[in-house]
Image (spheres, helix red, strand yellow):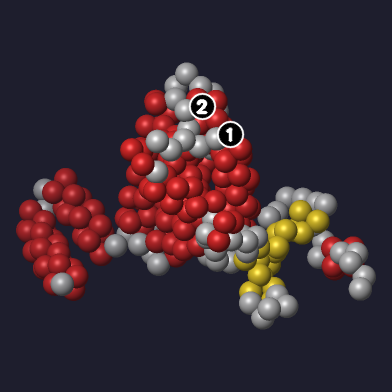
Amino acid sequence: MNEDIGPIMKKWKYLVDDINVRIITGLDGKPKLQLRLDLGILQMELDGRPDGKRPARHDSYLTYYEKKASDSTKGKFYLTPGECMKLQQEAIQYYHRYLALMKLEDFQRVIRDTTRNLQVFDFVEKFSNNKEIIWSFQQYRPYVLMMNTRALASMNLKAARFDEALKHIRKGIATIEKFYKKFADKSDEDMFELEFLKQWANEIEEGRPLSDSDRLKRELEKAVLDEDYEQAAILRDEIILLQRHESHSRK
């Protein structure tokens, strides 16, 4: 059997300025996620651990060490540097996968994988007594938070839920700002995650179509400024009726 992957790479050219990703059907009949890199191809499972392995017969090293922590007597559980390295290498697998999934707009799985890596950061912070190791994980938290926020907001934007999308973005901004305050002594001045989310929020605010409620409120403001109180009264009634209808529809 010829194991040279050159012919596959020739057919699938690497584009420098893009995330090269596709879904193929594996020999087991299941869909596989492939990420084209400059020197090769990463192939990942869509669900479970990206490489399909089950370390120590668990879904991942994270679930394995979580079990060890919960089983330890009197809370005497600490992660060794070697165990932290395994968690870090595993987190990189999930990073490659959620990066590829974001390109495919599979937002649910991006949310799943970014949430999972954030749990890794929390776990290491709780059970490692090495500050340098803890920071080696924590330094990536703003980026993972940004990707998690992007997926949450994008999912809502796709459904034209603009207010919900903005709510997620503002929450993401607040969480990242809290992180930078906590680690002010270690963080640098390049807070690109915050800049990206703030700019994105502004673009959504400026470009989104007005809802019926927003349009009526804007017309009401104009009527009041123009001292057209009769028209203002009519618009107020319309807003009240619309709000009642929306409230009834949600029940």
In this view, 187 is above or below 92: above
**Viewer-side residue, 173 vs 143:** 143
Q: Does the residue at mark 2 contact the one at mark 1 (Cβ under 8 Å)?
A: yes
Q: Is residue 24 visible?
A: yes
Q: Is residue 128 above or below residue 170?
A: above
The numbered mark, 2 or 1, whose residue comes first in the sequence reads 1
Residue 153 picture quarter? bottom left
Q: Secondary structure at mark 2?
A: loop
Which three-letter amino acid code belongs to the residue tagged 2?
Asn
Horizontal and vertical percent position of residue 61: 54, 51
Mark 2 surroundings within 10 Å by alpha-carbon count, few (fewer than 14), some (14 through 19), many (20 or more)? some
Q: Where's residue 41, x and y in %? A: 77, 59
The Cα–Cα distance between marks 2 and 1, rounded to whole angstroms, is 8 Å
Q: Which residue is mark 2?
A: 130
The quadrant of the image that shows the C terminus is bottom left
Which quadrant, please, contains the N terminus? bottom right
Q: Residue furthest top?
A: 185
In the rendered image, which residue does mark 1 sit on? 81
Out of 75 and 197, give the one closest to the viewer.
Answer: 75
Residue at the extreme bottom of the image, as rendered: 29
The kind of residue tagged 1 is Pro
Left of 214 or right of it: where is 172? right
* Of 55 and 22, the residue lying toward us: 55
